[in-house]
Image (cartoon, rainbow, N blue to C red):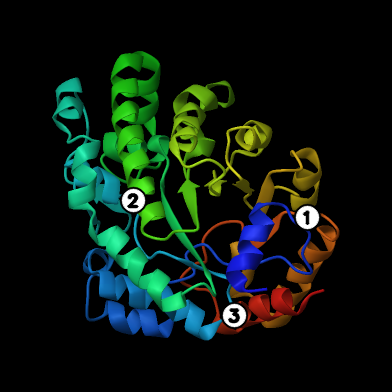
Amino acid sequence: MTSRERFLAACACQPLDRPPIWVMRQAGRYLPEYRELKAKSSFLHMVRTPELALEVTMQPLRRYALDAAILFSDILTIPEALGQPYHFRDQGGIGMEYRIETRAQIDALAGADAVPEKLAYVPAALRLIRQEVADTKAVLGFGGSPWTLATYMVEGGSSSDFERIKLLFYTDRAMFDALLEKLTAALITYFKMQIEAGADAIQIFDSWGGIIAGPDYEAASLQWIKRIVAAMPADFPIILYAKGTAPHLTDQAFSGVRVVSIDWTSDLAIARRNLPANVAVQGNLDPVLMQTEPEIVARETTRLLESMRNLPGHIFNLGHGITPRAKLACMESLVATVTNWK
């Protein structure tokens, strides 16, 4: 069984001798070869240059026996394509060129028809990745959820309290919905582009879904994700990762996605038993463990694997992205433990 076949079988909840493994943010600053490349080229230049995106995507696969390659890109390509560029602040975090404050600004954003031209470099990179791995590895595309993208656009970048986006949601639902409608349409176009370019699955990152009041998660975020999933090809694997949304796992599982990615705060085996048998789960080792020691990673990874024994539909992953301070030896231990487990 190839890595690609293993990954797709897990998405379909078929029994396997071991789960497939990939890691969120598996390409990045914890790799010395990435830091070397980054010293010669900016992050945004690498994202926008298909050959460089291919190189960064392949770096972790050259080191580790991972089952999937995830496109090296950024969720904020969509706001940029619609006319709201972004940058990285000197003090850390994301800054948008301006923040959305009026309905006129939303109306002035480009529509979904701008996405194919503005983001042509994304399918170009995916085609290069597909060519590089052929049918041996799964190839994953991704994007942000409409709600998560809207937080950056309305807040003007990274936020500590998300006050502006929440106020918009509660005080001017028509304006809020207008922005989310535009983002949803753009993401549908974007994800179809990625699928046509060879992606085997798409992961939607609802990174800030957990900051919404519980009763409002459906209206603010999940309903828009459902629209996106409904517009994708039938039975195409969509993975939903929504940090901090444990109370909504069942609703997410009935959203039409094939895989629910679960953060490290939930007991994965309990979640697996409580969710529909035809929806796979992904996760969910605490990323901080990757800063410890290889033997600790092996111990905790084995504990998670044993908790999932005889429970089909599991894709092994961290409960969030790997951090820049992760140790290479810990990543080696993680991959070896999963790939050698029976």
Number of the front mark, 3 or 2: 2
Image quarter (top left, top right, bottom left or bottom right) of the N terminus: bottom right
**Sooner in the amino-acid sequence: mark 3 or mark 2:** 3
Number of the front mark, 2 or 1: 2
Q: Which residue is mark 2?
A: 193
Residue positioned 19% across, 23% down in the render: 102
The image's mark for residue 65 is 3
Count residues near mark 3 (Cα–Cα under 10 Å), then give few for <14, some for 14-19, many for 20+: some
Residue 47 percent location from the top left of the image: 28, 65
Residue positioned 71% across, 65% down in the render: 19
Amino acid type at mark 2: Met
**Sooner in the amino-acid sequence: mark 1 or mark 3:** 3
Residue 200 percent location from the top left of the image: 50, 58
In the image, residue 221 above or below residue 338: above
Count residues near mark 2 (Cα–Cα under 10 Å), then give few for <14, some for 14-19, many for 20+: many
In the image, residue 61 above or below residue 7: below
In the image, residue 99 above or below residue 200: above
Q: Which residue is mark 1?
A: 312
**Sooner in the amino-acid sequence: mark 2 or mark 1:** 2
Residue 301 percent location from the top left of the image: 73, 69
Res 211 seen here: yes
